[in-house]
Image (cartoon, rainbow, N blue to C red):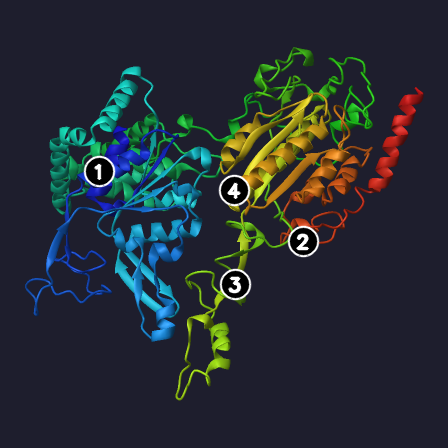
Amino acid sequence: MDDLRLALVLNAISPEIGGVLVRGEKGTAKSTAVRALAAVLPPVAVVSGCRFACDPERPAPDCPDGPHTSHGSHGPARAAVSRPTRLCELPVGTTEDRLVGSIDIERALTSGVVSFEPGLLAAAHRGVLYVDEVNLLHDHLVDLLLDAAALGVAHVERDGVSVRHDARFVLVGTMNPEEGELRPQLLDRFGLTVQVAAPREPAARAEVVRRRLAFDGAPEAFAARYAAVERELSARIAAARAALPAVRLPDRELTRIAAVCAAFEVDGLRADLVTARAALAHAAWEGRAEVTEADVRAAAALALPHRRRRNPFDAPGLDPGQVDAALDAARRHLDDGDPAEAEPDVSDLDTGSLDDASPGGDADPGCDADLGPDADAAAGPDGEAGGRGAGGEPDPGPGGSGPGGGAPAPGDAPTGNGAAGRPWADQAPTTPPVGAGAETPGSVVAPSATFRARRLEVPGVGRGVPGRRSRAVTGAGAVVGAQVPAGRLRDPHVIATLLAAAPHQRARGRGGPGLKLSSADLREARREGREGNLVLFAVDASGSMAARARMAAVKAAVLSLLLDAYQRRDKIGLVTFRGEAAQLALPPTSSVDVAAARLASLPAGGRTPLAEGLLLAHRTLARERLRDPSRRALLVLLTDGRYTAGPEPGPAAGLLARSGVAAIVVDCETGRIRLGLAGVLAAGLGAPLLALSDLVATGAAPGAGDAGRGTGPGTPGGRRSRPAAAGPDGAAMGAGLAATVRALRDAA
């Protein structure tokens, strides 16, 4: 918590740093620390009656409540009052007009008076603006928030009215990474970041509980016990603020800052500016007249960790040894004048990313996303050396390791977890979650290279949370009509309002220019944009998918779709099925990086309980529909259509279709002989059918409604066209071939 306290204090001394992002697991007192900050900040003097908290000594010349006349100028001065520093909280469900302010449209249209109502940015001026769960706030609101924090000014441009006012505040955002990450572009806009965790020492944990119990028993007495310490801290912050303008940043230390930022290869120059401002504030906090190397080190440790994140699957973080190595190299450069020493190689200390996150860590260079014939041919027509055929008949082949276990093809020996060269039967089983049943041993295959995925959509028009996937009626987007406002008018449709008022002008006694309006005439714009969806991946991880090239391609496809879901602000979930049961590997969440880590370590092998996977997907989606009815779901099923355990998948597919679940079936079947069972499954689901190669974006990305092989677009009612034939032989021919194979087996 020392880093958190320091980051909050530095922003209190110099709000130009740009705020602090506090990352940590639940129950680590993130909100408590932020709310305590306002209590120790010095009181502020404001112009009496000014809604924008102008400083009486330096009032803003363009304040909407101005002009304010300061002391020493012509005209009387407005009275000044002193008040405590404000802590304004921005709720996750806030709207744009509540954040930046809005015009009273009804008053403007009926009375002809332009009246601006300030938002939270104005209320937080010269105070603290706290955003809890900032990662759940919509992106465009985060952009507005960070723009104001960086510029110190809020601009409101809407409905032909332009308002500008000062908005300098200490911005603090907290988030739990388990609930989803901020985009790297937004992470970079926060000045500092801190990772907090609960203490592991029993003595420290006991002291936290002891103090909380003391506060609950006697809040006033507890506060009085620490009042003197808080006054001392408040005075020190005020002294640092006063001393900050006089603190110098020598060229030597500025070069050190530039060298450290260049060593970590951060994008742009914002890291250099933030580190310099934080170093100046740290020097003022320590009572120094100029910045030293110690100030640079403290600032870099807070300003650089989140700026090293390159993609959504990289974990933000910075090893202290990396900062020391960069500072040592910069020191040698400054002492010796050797430019080559200024940029040390810190890659050896890198915290890593998804590329090396698989448990085995042995990426096979031969594992690529070849979507043509692969090792499936060596496993026989149904892709398994043992197990059941397409109809579920037992077929324990030679070398099988149990009922339906099957031995892998010669080129498919597992490589992860130190399993190279070991027999298939020696693999340790993966521990299943509670209620998942027994797991079948399997191999872990590293994913091949990802690609830019096409956009898959839910048919129809929804009303969910704003996002970037499916069509929806939202607060932003293209105007497609007008409607009577349900509450306060926020987005007027001028033409529709005039048309509604025109027939009543004679009855209202209009006798001159201008219209006579009433509140019943007001209309607001109906806009259509994009919404975020719940994308539930159901991945077949059975033995028929265990061929190395096939599973690598499937994992690459799912990772590519996960990255696409991250960019489109979707919630995602992951269901896997193998062995005798299905399991919910990841409940629906916004944390895409957690899903990527679970997928990278997903083993493959065993039998195929396809129906169990479909039923678990149905239960998961039904539960999420109750939790969040406005968020529409999309089921993405990746399978070859085979089932070798449990009942037939037809009834389960029909259950999903009757419940109105929008689904897409990705046919993972490859090889020379194809049964087309995925096409039969897609027909039962009423879903489009795609091949793995069809997931790659080419040109304009069509939606899921027309993503199938010859399928038509989805209709607004949610019913989708029947999929066309699966593969060159078609679904019907595939089903016939499967029946022939079963008959031959029975005869044998």
Tag 3 or tag 2, which sits nearer the N-term? Answer: 3
Judging by the rendered image, the residue that carries numbered circle 2 is 717
Location of the N terminus (image quadrant): top left
Q: Secondary structure at mark 3?
A: strand
* Residue type for callout 1: Val
* Residue type for callout 4: Tyr
Lateral position of residue 65 relative to residue 362, left or right: left
Quarter-wise, where is residue 580 in the image? top right
Q: Secondary structure at mark 2?
A: loop
Packing grade of label 1 (10 A; few <14, some 14-19, many >=20) is many
Mark 3–mark 4 contact, CB under 8 Å?
no
Judging by the rendered image, the residue that carries numbered circle 1 is 9
Tag 2 or tag 4, which sits nearer the N-term? Answer: 4
Judging by the rendered image, the residue that carries numbered circle 4 is 566
Tag 4 or tag 1, which sits nearer the N-term? Answer: 1
Packing grade of label 3 (10 A; few <14, some 14-19, many >=20) is many
Judging by the rendered image, the residue that carries numbered circle 3 is 526
In the picture shown, does residue 48 fall above or below 362?
below
Q: Position of residue 601 (x, y in %)?
A: 57, 25
Lateral position of residue 191 relative to residue 395, left or right: left
